[in-house]
Image (tube, rainbow, N blue to C red):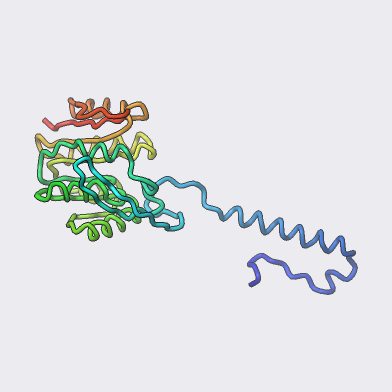
Amino acid sequence: MREKNEKIFGPEDLKDLTPEQVIKLYGKQYKNEKKEKKKKIVKFQHYYVENPESELTIKTLTLTLKNGHTYIFKAPSGVYGKKEIDKATKVLLENIEITGKKILDIGCGYGIIGITLKKEYPDIEIYMSDINKRAVEFSKINSKNNNIFADIRQGNLFEPWNNEIFDQIVSNPPIVAGKKIWMKLIEDSFLHLKKDGSLQLVAFHNKGGSRIKNYMNKIFGNVSEVVKKGGIRLYKSVKV
C-alpha cells in the first residue's frame, strides 16, 4: 500500500541518473519516512489521564490478604498497578479502620480497593471514581466478576460527586500527578465528609507521604498514623 507522503519516481525522473544516484534518491526518501514514523510514537503517559493512548493489554492479578481471602482482578495497561498489586494498596486494605457505611474509593484504578472492601465488609455501600475512562471500564468489569455492586463514575476528583456526602473516603493517592492534585483531593475530601467522617490515605512516607500527612493535618486539624509498615504509612484524619 502506498504511504501518504510517498513520492513515485517515473522513467523520466530516473533516465539520466546513475545506479548510485538512484539508490541515494530512494535512500533519502526512506530516511524521511522513518522520521515521520518516529513523530507518531506516543510519548510516555502516566495513568492520571482521561483517555489513555497506550495499546490495551490485560493482565490477571491475584490479591491474597493476610486473612487468607483471595480476589482476582483484570488489570489493563494505562491504569495504575497494571503489572502487580501495589504494596501500599495491600497495606491499606489490611489495616483500614472502617468507621461508616457510605464509603468512597477515589482514584479507584481498576477497582481493587473498593471491590475488596465490599467483599470484606458486605454491609457497606461502595462508591468509586477515577478520571481514567479505562480504569472506570475495568472497575465495572471487576465488580461484576467479583459479584459486588458499586456506584462507579468517571470524572476528575470530586466532579462526579458534587452533591454527595460520605462517611469515609479512602485512596492510594496519585502522587505522580503532582502536588496540586493530591492537595485538591485532601481539601475536597473535607467538604465531602460528614461530621466525624474520616479520610484515610496510604503512601510511602519518604516518597511524598510525609507531605501528604502534613497537609492532611493542615486541612483537618488532626492526623494519625494507623499503621507503619516497610516505609508505608496509612494516614487518617477525622472531620471534627
Is residue 190 in view from this perspective?
no
Residue at (38% x, 40% y) in the render: 177
Residue at (30% x, 31% y) in the render: 232
- Give 4 or 42, whichever is nearer the viewer: 42
- Give 55 or 42, whichever is nearer the viewer: 55
Residue at (45% x, 55% y) in the render: 53
Q: Name the image quarter holding the N terminus.
A: bottom right
Residue sitting farthest toward the front: 68
Where residue 149 appears, as percent x and y from the top left, is 17, 57
Q: Name the image quarter holding the C terminus.
A: top left
Tell me if 66 is positioned left or right of 20 in this view: left
Is residue 65 in view from this perspective?
yes
Residue at (9% x, 34% y) in the render: 196
Q: Quadrant of residue 25?
A: bottom right
Where residue 119 appears, as percent x and y from the top left, is 17, 50
Above or below: residue 196 compared with residue 166: above
- Give 75 or 12, whichever is nearer the viewer: 75
Above or below: residue 56 compared with residue 211: below
Q: How many marks?
A: 0
Q: Quadrant of residue 58?
A: bottom left
Where residue 204 appears, as percent x and y from the top left, is 33, 31
Where residue 187 appears, as percent x and y from the top left, is 24, 35
